[in-house]
Amino acid sequence: MPFPNTVNYNWAAGFPGRWASENPRRIVIPGPNGFRAGLGGLNIARFAWVQADGVMLLNAAPTAAAGSGATGTATVTDGAISAIAVSEGGTGYTVAPIVTLSGGGGSGATAVAVVSGGEVTAINVVNAGTGYTEAPTVTITAQTVPNGAPQGFVYADQQGLTTQYLQEATMLIPEGFMAQLAEGGDVFATSSTPATIGQAVYASTTDGTISTGTAGSAPEGSIDTGWKVSQGNAAGSPIIITGPVAAA
C-alpha cells in the first residue's frame, strides 16, 4: 500500500453562532460601557445594529428620515388642484417623500413626489379633488428608512440564559445582558435561502436573519453585510460565512 500523498478535508457541520475556524477574527470594540442586548433581547447567530446610545444592540436597523427641506405650492382652478409647483427641492431624499394636502375648503386631492439626485424635482397631481376655494397647504414628509449596514454578527459566547424548567439551550441573550459582535472571521450561521460559496450575505433590517444571493441583489427589506459565503448548504442548514479580516 503506497504512502498517502493527499488529504481530503471537509468543514465540519457546526452550530450556528459558533466560530468555524481558527482563522483571524475581528471583534467590534465597544465603548466604556460595553454592549448590551436591547429591548426584547438579542438573537444569537443573526446580525445586529448598535443603537443611537452606542450601548444597546438590536437585531433591527435604526431608522432615519430619508431627506428634508422640500416644500411645494398648490394652484387651484375651478375648485380643483390643477398643479403643485416645487418651491424648494430639499436634500438627501433616497425615496420619494409623502405629499399631503390640507385646508383650502375642499377635499379628495392627492399627489406624489418625484425624486432625482436626492432632491424633489416634481410633484404630480394624482387626484385633483373638488370644492377648493383657496390653495391648500402642501406638506412633504420624508419616509423613514433603515440606517446603514449592521455593525456585526452576534456570535455565541455563553451569554444566553435558560429561563424555563429543563430548558437545554437558548439562542436569546436577555435584555440588558452583555453581548459581543463579530465583524470578521469565519462563523457558522443559517440562511433562509440555499447558499453557495462566494455569494453575498444579506441581513433583514427587521430581525437580522440571513439570506444569500448574487452581489448587488439584496432582497427587499434586507441589506448587504459585506460578508461572504465560505461554505454553502441547503436553506436552514448550517453554512459558514466570512467577514473581512482587516479594516477596509
Image (cartoon, rainbow, N blue to C red):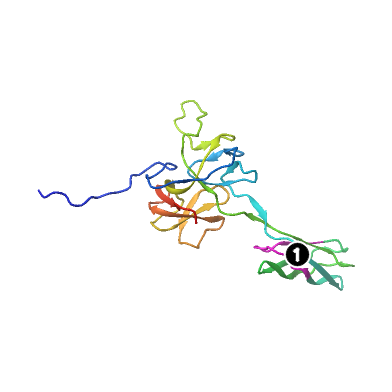
| Residue 94 location (% of width, % of height) | 65, 63
- The range drawn in magenta is 86-101
Residue, disc 1: 70
Q: Is residue 15 above or below residue 108?
A: above
Residue 80, image x, y percentages: 83, 70
Residue at 53% in and 36% down: 173
- Residue 69 picture quarter: bottom right
Q: Left or right? Give the position of 105 relative to 164.
A: right
Residue 110 spot, x, y in % from top left? 76, 65
Residue 72 location, quadrant: bottom right
Residue at horizontal 86 percent and vertical 61 percent from the top: 103
Query: Residue drawn at (56%, 53%), measured in percent from left and top?
Result: 149
Q: Nearer the viewer, residue 181 or 122?
A: 181
Residue 77 is left or right of residue 97, and the answer is right
Q: Residue at x 46, y 39 (%)?
A: 156
Query: Looking at the image, can residue 29 be seen?
Result: yes
Residue farthest toward the right in the current orientation of the protein: 133
Return the x and y of residue 188 as percentages of the image width and height. Answer: 41, 45
